[in-house]
Amino acid sequence: MNFKPFHTLALMALLAALAACGDSSSSSSDDSDTGQARTVTGTASAPSGMVASLRAPDPLRVVLDFLIQPAAAAITGLQPVNGATVELIRVDNDGNPVGEVLATTTTSTTGDYTLTLPQGVNLAGNLVVRISGADAQMRAQVVEEAVNIDPTSEFLLREFIAQGTDLEQLVINEVVKLKGKVEAFDLTAGANLTDMLEQLDAEVGDLVENQVAVINDGGGDAATVAGHYRANAFSLGLHDSDDQSGGTFATDLYTSTFTFSDGGDGIVDLNLTGEESAEGMLSGNTVSGAWLDYGTSGEEMDETFSAALTASGILSVEGEFEEEVDDEHAFRFPPSVYNLQRVGDRGLFFQVSKEAAVRYGVTQDGALNPDDRRGDEAFRALEVFARTPTDFSDNDLDGDFGRVYLATEMEQGLIAVEAETNVVSFNGNGNLNLATGTFHRLGVGTGYETGATETVENLSVIIDGDGDIVAIGGEPEDGFINDTHDFISLMRAEGSDSEFARFDTTLMVKLPQATPDVAGNRYRMMLLSLFLEGNPAGGANMEMYASQFNTFLTLDSATQATLAGGINEVSKNNLAANLETSVDEVEESFSVDVAANGAATLTLEAGDGTNVLDGFFNQDASLGLFTLRFEPDQGDPNELGLVVLVEVTGDNDED
């Protein structure tokens, strides 16, 4: 029997008729065109769990899907949405439709569509194509002539809306560039749109949030931040292996020197002139059986790149997709955006950076082997950039400074973190006194302890004319004071390869003479913390927390504050486990207690415990430095970290 079944022949004839109808419709549109209308084309694709809800009912659709090869999707696992109605509409800044539908078309059996813009309708950030179902919709901004409708386009539009963007005034090239950065990530579709949007938030939310904040803001005056800068970064890292053969806990310190110069039109030219670093990595299947690698490095450099300074004091540096190859491994780093927030009108900036890499094997000829994926790596860092003085002398440094401190320690069988707060008094003649403060320490296998820090008097301080802190109490020190003599940063690393490693960072801010007025202030919160719990021989739980860029603490009064934003979490339940990443949206209230000298305690009652921030505000309440600890309702504190609050002003303060 070698004849073709009747229903197959009939379907082939139907497909030919459908194609002819599609051609006729297109020709009709072209016939009425004056030659100036623009055509938009693209593909609609969605997670498999929602495809059926987005397309028009058609009893033949299942058979058509079988006969025709689906189009490839940019995100692995997405399926084409065929037979869906595509509508061209305008939206307001909240994403709501405005006016009538401007044009419609239907996606083909492979999810493709073609739509001609009506006369007088041009590409714009508030011009949208959408496909809708009973309980879901996906949209894409029509900012170029090739527009795919997928979870990424919906995620980007939602982020612009969330940050209060004037969609009509968007520079369309910025939207195109941002979408390209997101599509460079290695993403796999979730079961439905909700899962996919959550994954996008976890994987690329910080990049998008950073970029949109800059797109929304006006240009700043680059000349006001020119000068020589020192930068210190304290970084935490977690690495895994895809086969769960082992993992790594890491801490890195970086201290760098820069020159900032005015590049015109809000552009700051950054020249990196040198960098020193220290790194410790505890690797293995369990903490008790892990091995330690510790090392330091330093080099003179001469690298120049550009950053955009905005009117609200954001200094933004864009990082491109990169690959690195060494003898054993190759790494892919997705695109990133580093946003530094300026403190008032000072030459002082802070940021929390979030970086990631995918680790691969290397081919015989020394290239990255994309078929040999080996693991993921995540890094979170708190970094400060401070303009340095040119003629510092001892009498420039006097008065009380509030000090916060964070340290990690590692060796075989141990991962620990420690935080401290106290007051340091400088007397203007090259000496300091340390007042009694409080320390908190927790570790895998060692539990939690707290107590008083040591009181020390008349420690000598040696600081060069350029603000470089050389020694304290006769011991070598690495740090700096800023050009307004009201902020200090110190960093220290010590260790022995295969034996132990310890890293610490200290931040100090000059305290006010009277209670600072914080009521009504709005602060960008920059948080970096580490959760540790469990047994070093097995289930050692490790979690890194870092705030998203648009996480704000608003002082509703002198005693009450509201926190709104997102906290990024990277976790593993033992050293060899695979990394898990998520973003927790927060909207909570803090109680606030500010003393006459700027010392402050902020307390947030969570569902299963209490977050406590202990620290200090500076003289004009533009900067706050705090340690963080989480106290569960049952048991001892299990999370320690640092929080920096930078007051934000200007037009770009809305979420």
Image: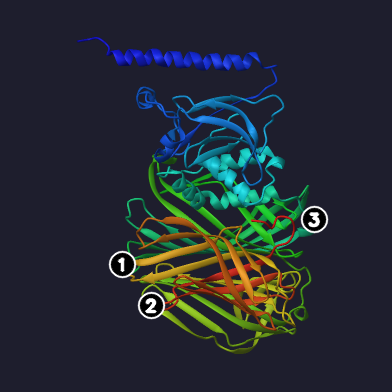
The tag on residue 75 is: none
Instruction: Specify few, some or many for label 2: CA neighbours under 10 Å numbering under 14, 14-19, or 20 or more.
Output: some
202 or 532, nearer to the observer: 202
Instruction: Specify few, some or many for label 1: CA neighbours under 10 Å numbering under 14, 14-19, or 20 or more.
Output: some
Amino acid at pointer 1? Gly
Could one spot residue 300 in this view of the protein? yes
Count of numbered badges drawn on the protein? 3
Question: Residue 69 at x, y = what percent?
Answer: 39, 25
Instruction: Specify few, some or many for label 3: CA neighbours under 10 Å numbering under 14, 14-19, or 20 or more.
Output: some
Question: Residue 603 at x, y = what percent?
Answer: 56, 75
Which residue is identified by label 3?
223
Position above or below: 486 against 138: below
Which residue is identified by label 2?
446
Quadrant where the image shows the C terminus:
bottom right
296 or 15, nearer to the observer: 15
The tag on residue 538 is: 1
